């Protein structure tokens, strides 16, 4: 028989054995709906941009490796993570600065905001970036960055590193090798393909791809097309503007892999959407989070009852399982967004609620594909 006479004694004895009674955890694990500590967030360009450019003057690159400003969710203060699964933030690179080639388990999506002369090289494909261009770094893909222009540049990055870190699966490598004079040699920079923007050229015509090459890149962890130019995407949005579109997202398009037809990255999905002048969308929520960057126009998004007024280059967040709807301004707006829905979909954890015009809610448990 036990000498334990009450709950306090039992809890203390369990603690000594590194055991916790489920009765103390029941609320956390048997909630009827997700409980998310993350809050809606808005980061204004007028606030973050001066700090980003200042970082190039006061933070030596040798100390930082790269000068990223990582946005912290208001519900996760000081975390450096925009959600518990995602990094989101800006990087500024002054003229002439470049990074060494490296790779990591985490996947990344990047959209160009300001400046000219920026590039990202992924698996030898040197991608020159202009405003609104999107470039992806699949998990395990060798990549490097630089600025060959005469002014500092800024882009916005989204990475799934908090997700991989939570599973203790982060790896980082900087031992890139090529064969030099017949021997494998560690190099700081990749040999680039002769054609600039190679993947955008090879895959830039929708529904058509080269027939003489393999389309499986970096272990199949992402699209073989790394660069998606903004100009043709913007033209597509214009061509579709008179369509009915989505009542929840307006005229929205998804970047996809020409190999699989699925999302550009296994864990991240990338979209571009047009909200037409005065357009108001219906409410929706998802277990996945979504980070938005305004490329054109201005408007407001109500997230969990909080109204976020956004404009050019502003960044805002819709956390997972939080109702959100958009209300656009007097002219067309274009929003870039990244979501972790692909990661949740493959795990069977992606659930979406959408409200119709009558106010009724329909729920979709998205099947694993």
Image (spheres, rainbow, N blue to C red):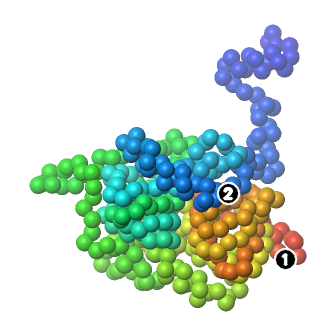
Image quadrant of residue 142?
bottom left
Q: Which residue is located at x 67 percent, y 88 percent?
A: 243
Q: Which residue is located at x 22 percent, y 55 percent?
A: 178
Secondary structure beneath dot 1 equals: loop
Q: Is residue 293 left or right of residue 202?
A: right
From where the camera sits, is residue 85 visible?
Answer: no
- Location of residue 42 in the rendering, given as x and y in whole percent from the top left corner: 67, 57
132 up-or-down from 57: above or below: below
Image quadrant of residue 272?
bottom right
From where the camera sits, is residue 49 visible?
Answer: yes
Quarter the N terminus occupies = top right
- Residue for badge 1: 357
Q: Which residue is located at x 11 percent, y 55 percent?
A: 181
Q: Which residue is located at x 71 percent, y 86 percent?
A: 244
Q: Which residue is the extreme one toward the top?
A: 3
Closer to us: mark 2 or mark 1? Answer: 2
Residue 86 — which label? none
- Residue for badge 2: 42
- Location of residue 25 in the rendering, given as x and y in whole percent from the top left corner: 77, 35
Cα distance in 3D space between marks 2 and 1: 27 Å
Nearer the observer, 63 or 36:
63
Nearer the observer, 216 or 238:
238
- Location of residue 274 in the rendering, given as x and y in whole percent from the top left corner: 64, 78
Nearer the observer, 121 or 141:
121
Q: Which residue is the extreme one toward the left?
A: 181
6 up-or-down from 298: above or below: above
Image quadrant of residue 299?
bottom right
């Amino acid at each position: 028989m036990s000498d334990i006479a009450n709950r306090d004694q039992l809890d203390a004895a369990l603690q000594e054995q590194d055991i916790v009674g489920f009765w103390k955890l029941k609320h956390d694990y048997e909630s009827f709906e997700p409980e998310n500590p993350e809050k809606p967030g808005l980061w204004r360009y007028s606030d973050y941009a001066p700090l980003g450019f200042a970082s190039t003057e006061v933070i030596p690159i040798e100390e930082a490796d790269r000068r990223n400003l990582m946005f912290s969710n208001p519900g996760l203060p000081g975390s450096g993570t925009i959600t518990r699964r995602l990094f989101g933030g800006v990087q500024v690179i002054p003229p002439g600065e470049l990074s060494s080639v490296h790779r990591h388990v985490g996947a990344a999506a990047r959209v160009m905001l300001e400046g000219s002369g920026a590039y990202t090289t992924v698996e030898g494909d040197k991608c020159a970036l202009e405003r609104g261009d999107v470039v992806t770094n699949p998990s395990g893909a060798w990549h490097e960055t630089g600025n060959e222009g005469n002014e500092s540049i800024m882009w916005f990055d989204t990475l799934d590193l908090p997700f991989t870190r939570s599973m203790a699966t982060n790896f980082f490598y900087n031992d890139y090798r090529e064969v030099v004079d017949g021997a494998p040699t560690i190099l700081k920079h990749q040999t680039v393909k002769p054609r600039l923007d190679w993947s955008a050229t090879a895959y830039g015509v929708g529904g058509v791809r080269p027939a003489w090459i393999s389309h499986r890149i970096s272990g199949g962890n992402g699209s073989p097309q790394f660069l998606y130019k903004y100009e043709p995407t913007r033209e597509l949005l214009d061509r579709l503007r008179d369509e009915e579109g989505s009542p929840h997202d307006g005229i929205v398009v998804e970047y996809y892999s020409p190999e699989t037809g699925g999302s550009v990255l296994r864990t991240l999905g990338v979209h571009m959407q047009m909200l037409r002048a005065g357009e108001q969308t219906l409410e929706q929520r998802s277990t996945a989070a979504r980070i938005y960057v305004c490329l054109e126009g201005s408007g407001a998004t109500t997230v969990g009852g909080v109204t976020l007024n956004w404009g050019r280059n502003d960044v805002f967040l819709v956390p997972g399982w939080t109702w959100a709807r958009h209300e656009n301004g007097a002219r067309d707006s274009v929003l870039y967004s990244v979501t972790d829905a692909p990661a949740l979909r493959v795990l069977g954890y992606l659930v979406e609620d959408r409200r119709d015009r009558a106010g009724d809610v329909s729920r979709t448990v998205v099947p694993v594909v």
